[in-house]
Amino acid sequence: MAALPPLNALRAFEAAARHLNFRLAAEELGVTQGAVAQQVRGLEARLAKKLFDRLPRGLALTEAGRRFHTPLRRAFRLIEEAVDDLSDDLQITISVTPSFASKWLVPRLNDFTSKHPDISVQVDARERIADFEGDGVDIAVRQGRAPFGANLVAEPLFSTEFILVCSPGTAHCISRPSDLSDQTLLNDTHGLWPLFLERLGVTGKPRMMNFSQTSLAIDAAVSGQGIALANAPLVSSELASGKLVQPLSDVLVEDLGFYVVMPKPPRQPQLVALMRDWLLSQV
């Protein structure tokens, strides 16, 4: 029997083959992009097979790479399941975006842990999409348009209404939509301000301050830096506490709803069902 390649090289290849990107594989494994590329090159040299075609914008598996990746992915999954079977602790991993985590999930999570003290919850708060295969994610909450994939189940959590929010000190300057043209508008990656202003009939070019995450735009609104166009559920606690107010009643309804997303079948059916039911109960 031939000696097996190093485990780190196999892990680097498997992650790169799933993402088709050395950078994303490196982020998952917690190493540098160069380290992943070097491990893959060493594996190709050891196997005397080219596993990837290096493209200008990513990677593509060669025929040998595809044949190698399929059983390797299955083998890593078996190892993960074996480790899970030996663990005495019940743990569920939920994948959410950073904004959803900080503004909606974390403030409510104590309710779940108090009801299920024997279950450890791991929150994976990153922008990347969970694949539920090699990332250890059991359940996710994502904003978008269903369906999300043939092997995924998506249940609506809540629809998306975007509302205007600002600090109480800013609100006195706004009594009608045209007043928005004199304000700083806090924009996130959804980029919905132009559409909303058009529907309100607001002309001109208001000042824009752009943020990579919705939570940052909301925090900027709390600190009085301008007006955010935010998902209503994500600002419910700030509105209830008076940190934010809604200066105008106009609402932008988009079909970018929030969904509870699960693989079928789930890796841990009972734990996933508990978390799904709890998430839906919080709406």
Image (spheres, helix red, strand yellow):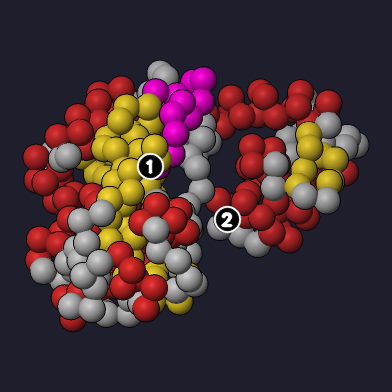
The local secondary structure at tag 1 comes to: strand
Query: In the rendered view, does 44 fall on the left or right side of 281?
Result: right
Q: Earlier in the sequence, mark 2 or mark 1?
A: 2
The reply to whether residue 238 is in sight is no
- From the top left corner, tell me how far across and down residue 245 is, in percent: 17, 66
The quarter of the picture where residue 218 lies is bottom left
197 lies left or right of 177:
right
Classify the position of the N terminus by image quarter.
Answer: top right
Is the C terminus in the top left, top right, bottom left or bottom right quadrant?
top left
Residue type beneath disc 2: Glu
Q: What's the CA distance linking mark 2 and mark 1?
A: 32 Å
Mark 1 neighbour density, 10 Å: few (under 14) some (14–19) many (20 or more): few
Judging by the rendered image, the residue that carries numbered circle 2 is 27
Magenta segment boundaries in residue numbering: 138-153
x and y percentages locating residue 168 in the rendered image: 16, 76
Q: Is residue 282 above or below residue 265?
A: below
Is disc 2 placed on a helix, strand or loop?
helix
Q: Residue at x 51, y 26 (%)?
A: 149
| 71, 181: nearer the viewer | 181
The residue tagged 1 is 254
> On the picture, is 244 further left or further right than 142?
left
Magenta stretch containing residue 171, yes or no? no
- Residue at x 11%, y 46% (from the top left corner): 111
Nearest the viewer among 106 and 148 is 148
Query: Residue 76's image quarter?
Result: top right
Residue type at the position of mark 1: Glu
Residue 160 placement (x, y as % from top left): 31, 43
Look at 23% across and 50% down and name the residue there.
233
